[in-house]
């Protein structure tokens, strides 16, 4: 992204030059008041202006040139060393060239002229600011300011802890104390500086690695820490086993949990800030035989609220999804296993519908990310606030759009269907393997086919497939016959000769040597039209509904994966891993 801290004066000039409309500026300012985001970021995220055009505009208005960092080649380490990493990250800038006594610095915010004076005093050089994309600057910072490895950082913390072995000894001796003494001892050990640094390192590294989950697992003689990155668990450097109890206590304190309770499962939340990012974490503590296992789910609001066009939909599937999402009433179901991206799809859909003329209400377990303008209710089954109870109350709150976190039972399904049939647009999720199976699942719950037929608009099944790293992907050729054996239709292999070009990731620092960076969705979108409605009434099987939907143009999960494979977005291994259970008819 370009400069995100766009001033109102420059924004008005964008309108004056016809780059954005007054209506778009008004919408961006309204979104800024609601979210507190920077104006430039909002204009880019809403596609009101392209990054290239915004860079060109800022360059002209501020009288400085702009540069594409990726086209400059490697930056001299001696130039990088002139500016400390903390300054470079704080102000989102990076030095890239030094000629005689002139230091050229790429900046994301051309309006911050004071930092240039600081750099001049710090380096003793004349400083020339050049505008660059914030995304490119951040990538360059990660590339050139080599961070201390997790293992080195952990070794340093452990070295500090050896000066005060009493903390570790008090941790290992905790089990022999009384319960009331135990709480005091654990709390004391959890506040020791090495333990605080250790926990902060675990959390910070997970956020930096864009992990979705952190697993802290005790074993008889060891402690294992793993991050789930792009859907796959990766083992991380771990401290000695003796620090486990203190780490657990520290995380419990941060999550407002009972540090003395180690026999029962506990659930809590904590919020951490890394730089300008604020990340909400759900914490689950589970007593196991060797000790308590902790799993933390990271919820980043920026990662959840993504434009639908950037989620990975195929054009045909996105057209169906948009049509059903904007219907005045009916039910849209989203299905898939845990971790398949259902929450992101739901939140992105709700965000696009979140306008002042819509009353949107959700009941969730838990509320993943608070969204301004949407009324979100947390399930509390212990006091009777279930999905069904909350949904029943929603109907007295004059909603236009309702989101039910999950249809778990017949009562919830019946109330959701009643809401859809009385003029409300309903979104919800189910746990099934594909879209046609959701209709069978509703029937098995006890929902009458005539109700499903009358209320369903669309069923979407989804999975997440890892994307190739853009920095290290490379091409290679395979035989057509090999791909045909994997289920790739010959009609899609229109390549000269007998070979097809595919892509794979070599592995680099940018992707932690995995060859993958980020994920995108595979979407099987079943639109419930007249033919499918009649099949539901006739109690057709999931296979019959699937075959009929495919004849009408529905893309299966495997077919979406094949498109991404042939388009160079992912690998054969990922296609097989994610869609292995799909049976091609």
Image: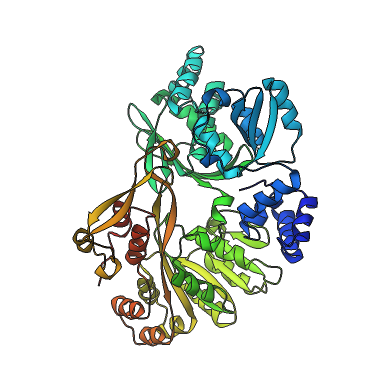
Nearest the camera: 178 or 216?
216
The image shows residue 148 at horizontal and vertical percentages of 49, 25
Q: Residue at x 24, y 64 (%)?
A: 487
Colour scheme employed for the rendering of this structure? rainbow
Residue 37, placed above or below residue 455: above
What residue sits 61% from the left and 26% below the top?
98
Compared across the picture, whether 331 is left or right of 539 comes to: right
Give how far across and how far down residue 115 sits, in percent: 72, 31
Q: In which quarter of the image is residue 14?
A: bottom right
Judge whether 99 appears above or below 382 on screen: above
Task: Residue 379: name its quadrant.
Answer: bottom right
Residue most toward the front? Answer: 100
Depth check, front residue: 128 or 165: 128
Image-based side of 99 in relation to 484, left or right: right
Percent of width and height locating residue 537: 38, 87
The answer to whether residue 191 is visible is no
Q: In this view, does 562 lie to the left or right of 39?
A: left
| Vertical order, 73 against 341 (above or below) | above
Q: Position of residue 183 (x, y in %)?
A: 54, 29
The residue nearer to you, when weighing 512 against 156, is 512
Residue visible at 68% across and 22% down in the picture: 125
The foreground one among 204 and 366 is 204
């Amino acid at each position: 992204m370009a400069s995100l801290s766009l001033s109102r004066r420059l924004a008005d000039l964008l309108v004056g030059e016809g780059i954005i409309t007054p209506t778009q500026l008004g919408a961006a300012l309204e979104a800024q008041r609601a979210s507190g985001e920077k104006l430039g970021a909002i204009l880019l995220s809403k596609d009101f202006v392209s990054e290239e055009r915004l860079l060109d505009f800022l360059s002209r208005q501020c009288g400085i040139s702009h540069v594409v960092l990726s086209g400059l080649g490697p930056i001299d380490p001696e130039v990088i060393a002139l500016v400390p990493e903390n300054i470079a990250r704080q102000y989102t800038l990076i030095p890239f060239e030094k000629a005689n006594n002139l230091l050229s610095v790429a900046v994301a915010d051309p309006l911050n002229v004071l930092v240039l004076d600081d750099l001049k005093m710090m380096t003793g050089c004349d400083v020339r600011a050049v505008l660059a994309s914030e995304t490119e600057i951040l990538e360059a910072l990660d590339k050139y300011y080599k961070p201390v490895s997790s293992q080195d950082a952990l070794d340093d913390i452990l070295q500090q802890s050896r000066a005060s072995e009493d903390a570790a000894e008090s941790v290992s001796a905790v089990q022999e104390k009384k319960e009331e003494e135990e709480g005091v001892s654990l709390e004391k050990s959890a506040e020791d500086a090495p333990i605080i640094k250790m926990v902060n390192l675990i959390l910070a590294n997970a956020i930096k690695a864009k992990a979705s989950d952190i697993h802290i697992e005790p074993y008889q003689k060891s402690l294992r820490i793993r991050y789930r990155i792009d859907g796959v668990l990766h083992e991380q450097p771990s401290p000695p086993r003796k620090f486990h109890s203190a780490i657990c206590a520290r995380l419990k304190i941060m999550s407002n949990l009972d540090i003395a309770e180690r026999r029962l499962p506990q659930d809590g939340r904590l919020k951490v800030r890394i730089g300008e990012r604020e990340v909400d974490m759900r914490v689950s503590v589970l007593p196991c035989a060797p000790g308590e296992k902790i799993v933390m789910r990271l919820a980043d609001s920026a990662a959840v609220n993504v434009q639908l066009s950037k989620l990975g939909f195929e054009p045909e599937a996105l057209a169906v999804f948009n049509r059903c999402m904007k219907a005045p009433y009916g039910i849209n179901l989203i299905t898939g296993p845990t971790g398949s991206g259902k929450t992101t799809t739901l939140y992105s859909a709700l965000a696009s519908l979140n306008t002042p003329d819509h009353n949107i209400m959700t009941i969730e377990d838990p509320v993943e990310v608070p969204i301004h303008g949407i009324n979100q209710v947390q399930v509390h089954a212990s006091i009777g606030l279930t999905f069904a109870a909350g949904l029943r109350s929603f109907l007295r709150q004059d909603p236009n759009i309702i989101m039910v976190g999950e249809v778990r039972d017949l009562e919830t399904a019946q109330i959701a269907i009643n809401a859809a049939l009385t003029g409300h647009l309903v979104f919800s999720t189910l746990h099934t393997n594909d879209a046609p199976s959701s209709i069978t699942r509703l029937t098995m719950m006890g929902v009458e086919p005539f109700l499903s037929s009358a209320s369903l608009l669309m069923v979407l099944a989804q999975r997440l497939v890892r994307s190739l790293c853009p920095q290290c992907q490379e091409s290679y050729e395979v035989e057509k016959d090999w791909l045909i054996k994997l289920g790739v239709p010959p009609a899609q292999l229109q390549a000269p000769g007998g070979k097809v070009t595919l892509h794979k990731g070599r592995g680099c620092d940018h992707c932690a040597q995995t060859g993958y960076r980020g994920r995108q969705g595979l979407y099987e979108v079943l639109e419930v039209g007249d033919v499918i409605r009649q099949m539901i009434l006739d109690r057709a099987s999931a296979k019959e509904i699937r075959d009929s939907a495919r004849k009408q143009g529905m893309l299966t999960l495997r077919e979406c994966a094949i498109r991404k494979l042939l388009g160079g977005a992912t690998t054969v291994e990922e296609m097989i891993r994610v869609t292995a259970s799909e049976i091609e008819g």
